Image: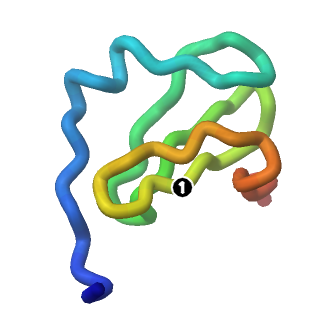
Amino acid sequence: MSETAVSFDRRMLEALICPRSHTTLKYDADKQELISQSSNLAYPIRNGIPILLVDEARTLD
């Protein structure tokens, strides 16, 4: 599978929340991540699918 960016449906963002804090997420198109400011986590988007698992998220700097 190629490493090309797959577009993410931004309308889906309205329905998604952080699994840890239950707050809204911000979409970072450059890094292909969903950001939870309150949890200080970034959830990856792989092949257009958000991975909303705390174990898969990275801690923000």
In this view, 6 is above or below 13: below
**Residue hosting label 1:** 44
Q: How far from the left and from the top, in percent, is residue 28?
A: 41, 49
Q: Residue at x 32, y 54 (%)?
A: 29
**Residue 19 position within the rendered picture, expressed as x and y whole percent measured from the top left:** 70, 23
Q: Identify the residue at image location x=56%, y=18%.
A: 17
In this view, the residue in front, 39 or 51, is: 51
Relative to 19, 26 lies left or right: left
Q: Is residue 19 left or right of residue 28?
A: right
How packed is label 1: few (under 14 Cα within 10 Å), some, or many (20 or more)? many
Q: Residue furthest bottom?
A: 2
Q: How many marks?
A: 1
Locate the C terminus by quadrant. Answer: bottom right
Which residue lies most toward the front here? 1
Q: x, y (%) of residue 23?
A: 64, 13
Up the image or down, 32 lies above or below 42; here it is below
Q: Quadrant of the N terminus?
A: bottom left
Which element is circle 1 on? strand
Which amino acid, by three-letter code, is at mark 1? Pro
Position above or below: 4 against 23:
below
* Closer-to-camera residue (26/13): 13
Of residue 24 and residue 54, the one placed in the foreground of this image is 54
Q: Is residue 5 above or below residue 34?
A: below
Question: What colour scheme has been applied to the protein in the rendered image?
Answer: rainbow
Dividing the picture into quadrants, the one containing residue 30 is: bottom left
- Residue depicted at x 72% and y 55%: 56
Q: Position of residue 11 (x, y in %)?
A: 21, 22
State the image quarter where residue 21 is shown: top right
